Image: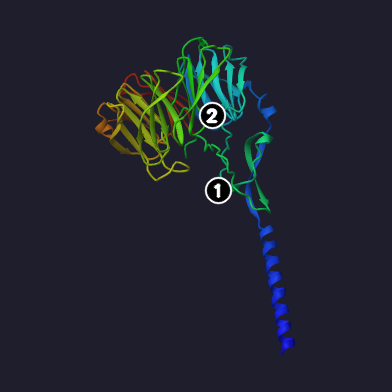
Amino acid sequence: MLYIMNNIIKLSFLMLISITFASCEDKLEEKYHVNSPIYLSYEDLRSSVKTEGSREFESPGKIYFKDNYIFVNEYLKGIHIIDNSDPRNPVNLSFLNVPGNVDIAIKGHSLYVDSYTDLVVLDIKDLSDIKERQRFNNYMGYMLPPTGNTLRYDNIDETKGVIIGWETKRVTIEVEQPDEFYPCYDGVNVSNASKSPGISNSTTGTAGSMARFILNNDALYVLKNEYQLTVYDISDVNSMTHSGDFYVGWMMETLFISENRLFIGGQNGMNIYDLSSPYSPEFISNYNHFRGCDPVVVENNTAYVTIRSGNTCGQNQNVLDVVDLTDINLPKQIKSYQMTEPYGLGIDNSILFVCDGSAGLKIFDADDPLTITQHVLALYPDISAFDVIPLGDLLICIGSDGLFQYDYSDIENIELLSTIEL
């Protein structure tokens, strides 16, 4: 009996050791599919800006207008330059290669762009020979481009350069998500020839409502990441200087200026700042809403806010909120309208333009904020609209289908002038 018991004990001990080692071995050999980063070295990034021949739109993003030119961001690749002297016949002039570009702002001959981690100032006096004037290395957040899947990230080494894409790999070690905060852009695509006068050496251009860069006389405001606003003094055209950084909340996304006030749209609401001291914005008040992606435009005492669900945006709500700003210290919602997939918007003399994603471009008479959707001026359901710039009589609209221009001088008979398709 003792012999049998000893054997049982030995067998149990051996089984325990076997299980322990097998368990350890299983853990070490556990496999994952991960997104492994593809890097572009900082040296190559900082020698990549150049003017090239025109190219077709592939993933058009944010838009900017100045002096009869339209600048269209090609997401993370650069900028299309369009001669729009004749809106009926826009000419795709050239492409400015700027890796990692998402946002654009222009004053005079200076073009301000992001390039992954860097903020770059370009001289566009001669659009055929654009030159880099100034570069601020590592002034923007270290961003992660979209992966197109839900796999975790492989280890990220910022010293290797910026990440320009991903490849799927199978690894045999447990991979942790990075602890650092990285802004991760989902992209801006929605679902589904007379001689030009050139760029003038004065005034600023006009951005769409999805802008993270915006100009206010000699101040440039940049959403450096989702919680920090950086202000630059651009009064000296040859030497832009950093004026300060300001914490502006969390998940901030867009900038809009009206009557010396800065409106910052974010996933949890809209923050309002006083720009009386342009290099030191002062917080006034905020308007909170349920979580959702949130551009904003303002006219007189009314703000119009689109709130979109999906992806990183939050809850399943897609609405247009109308906010009364009569008491700027206490903004309050006065109406909310159901939308389908709202992105950017624009307002011009109570004419409200809403880019409702796959539901198209919608144009309303917003003279009465309480009955906006009862006063439809035009619907364009066949385009996937992302953002607009209203310019008096001319509307510029960008979407996943391309660039569209409309003449709305006769609001009862809005005319499609031209299209640059994908």
Determine whether, in the image, residue 283 is placed left or right of residue 151.
left
Estimate the x, y position of residue 328 in percent, counting from the top left.
Answer: 31, 26
Q: Name which of mark 1 and mark 2 comes first in the sequence.
A: 2
Q: Secondary structure at mark 2?
A: loop
Looking at numbered disc 2 in the image, what kind of residue is underneath it?
Answer: Val
Whether 17 is drawn above or below 397: the answer is below
Q: Could you say which quadrant of the image residue 261 lies in? A: top left
Is residue 422 visible in the rendered structure shown here?
no
Estimate the x, y position of residue 57 in percent, counting from the top left.
Answer: 55, 29
Residue 195, disc: none
Q: Residue at x 72, y 86 (%)?
A: 4
Whether 57 is drawn above or below 133: the answer is below
Residue at far bottom of view: 1
Estimate the x, y position of residue 311 in percent, counting from the top left.
Answer: 47, 43
Q: Residue at x 52, y 11 (%)?
A: 198
Q: For mark 1, does the 10 Å Cα neighbourhood hold few (<14), some (14 to 19), or many (20 or more) residues?
A: few
Estimate the x, y position of residue 137 in percent, counting from the top left.
Answer: 62, 25
Q: Could you say which quadrant of the image residue 131 lies in? A: top right
Taking depth in this image into account, of 245 and 197 the one nearest to the observer is: 245
Q: Could you say which quadrant of the image residue 382 lies in? A: top left
Whether 78 is drawn above or below 306: the answer is above
Determine whether, in the image, residue 156 is placed left or right of residue 82.
right
State the residue position of label 2. Answer: 102
Is residue 108 visible in the rendered structure shown here?
yes
Q: Secondary structure at mark 1?
A: loop
State the separation of the CA atoms marked 1 and 2. 23 Å
Residue 150, disc: 1
Looking at numbered disc 1 in the image, what kind of residue is underneath it?
Answer: Thr
For the N terminus, give its image quadrant: bottom right
Q: Residue at x 68, y 35 (%)?
A: 159
Whether 275 is drawn above or below 345: the answer is above
